[in-house]
Image (cartoon, rainbow, N blue to C red):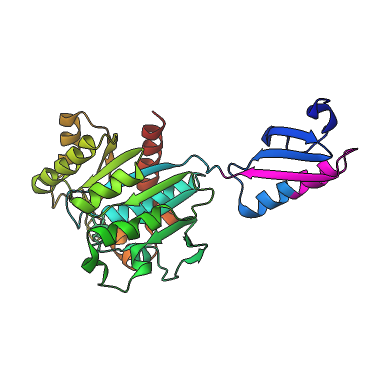
Amino acid sequence: MTDAREQLSELPHEQRIRSRKLAGGVATLIVDATGLSAAERSRVEEELRSAALSNDGVTEARIAMTATEPSRTLIAIGSGKGGVGKSTVSANLAIALAKMGKKVGLIDADVYGPSQPTLLGTDAKPTAEEERLIPVEAHGIKFLSLGQLVSPGHALAWRGPMATGALAKLVEADWDDSELLIVDLPPGTGDVQLSLIQRSRPAGAVVVSTPQDLSLIDARRAIDLFGKMSVPLLGIIENMATYVCPHCGEKSHPFGTGGAETAASEMGVPFLGRLPLSLAIREASDAGNPPAASGGAEAQAFEAIASKLLEAVAH
Ligand SMILES: Nc1ncnc2c1ncn2[C@@H]1O[C@H](COP(=O)(O)OP(=O)(O)O)[C@@H](O)[C@H]1O
Ligand SMILES: [Mg+2]
């Protein structure tokens, strides 16, 4: 048998061809489809088929596109308790990362209060293909939320196995070419968090806390949970730190400031940055206009944290 490489020469997409065979007029190619969208995949397949068929002695071409998923980094965003701005931070970090050129998906896994549809300003429902959910797009990111699957106020009723099953559907959805998946975890350190972390195996975790001691005690608990589950802690974000009076410009610290940074250094954990307590953040978030999507000081604050996060992921 002559070398298939000589007979099946001049094929396009050389760098994707993992193996080639020619026997009895049948050309068989195994092709790496990593990173291709469904449309690109069929285009590559067709181009290879017609190129193979144009070779002398080839009467049939079988093209196998391997179903490898792109390598994807999952980052869990947790907090010791609710109301510290975990969802706000998750949404805006996802958008800031997308603005930096990353392909980003966001999973709203908060069974107790899924809020991403509100924060991202869309109540569009995801479609499904062969039982796989197709995420909704908003502000340059893809996202899925438990809030899209149940009516408001109903998620609370299905903690435990039902919640775990629904969360698995979100993680296993068609995230296509997303490189980063940000997961907005439910607040706290209970069973739902535990099984979600076990199943989705995040590459790293971020903990959001407000600066006051009471919040930090809870944040430490969240950090312990990630430690016990061997999920590397990428860092802590301090939210609702400095308040700048919109009238006189005076800075004050209603929840204190620096608490999270101190706690981070005590625990030997990276500090990713601090976000101000800002009326603009609250108003824009409630209105479904994530501040990171527009310009201004708030967007810059999220971008600064996003680039620190990328550095932490790369290490
Ligand atoms: N830095 C901030 N400045 C002002 N309001 C904020 C800030 N971060 C969050 N909020 C507001 O606090 C409330 C709780 O935030 P949310 O992200 O839903 O918290 P969590 O997900 O931790 O429960 C929301 O109304 C949100 O708009
Ligand atoms: Mg939330």
Q: Looking at the picture, how far across and down is residue 302, in whole percent?
A: 36, 47
Left/right of residue 84 with respect to residue 139 in the rendered view: left
Name the residue at the front extreme: 24
Residue 49 inside the magenta-drawn segment = yes
Ligand 1 shows up in which quadrant of the image?
bottom left
Residue 298 inside the magenta-drawn segment = no
Residue 119 visible here:
yes
Please state which of residues 125 and 129 is positioned toward the viewer in this rendering. 129
* Quadrant of the image occupied by residue 51: top right
Name the quarter where the N terminus is drawn: top right
Residue 110 visible here:
no
Up/down of 251 relative to 235, above or below: below
Q: Residue at x 31, y 64 (%)?
A: 115
Q: What range is drawn magenta here?
A: 46-67
Left/right of residue 225 with respect to residue 48 in the rendered view: left
Q: Looking at the picture, how far across and down is residue 10, in whole percent?
A: 83, 34
Q: Residue at x 69, y 32 (%)?
A: 19
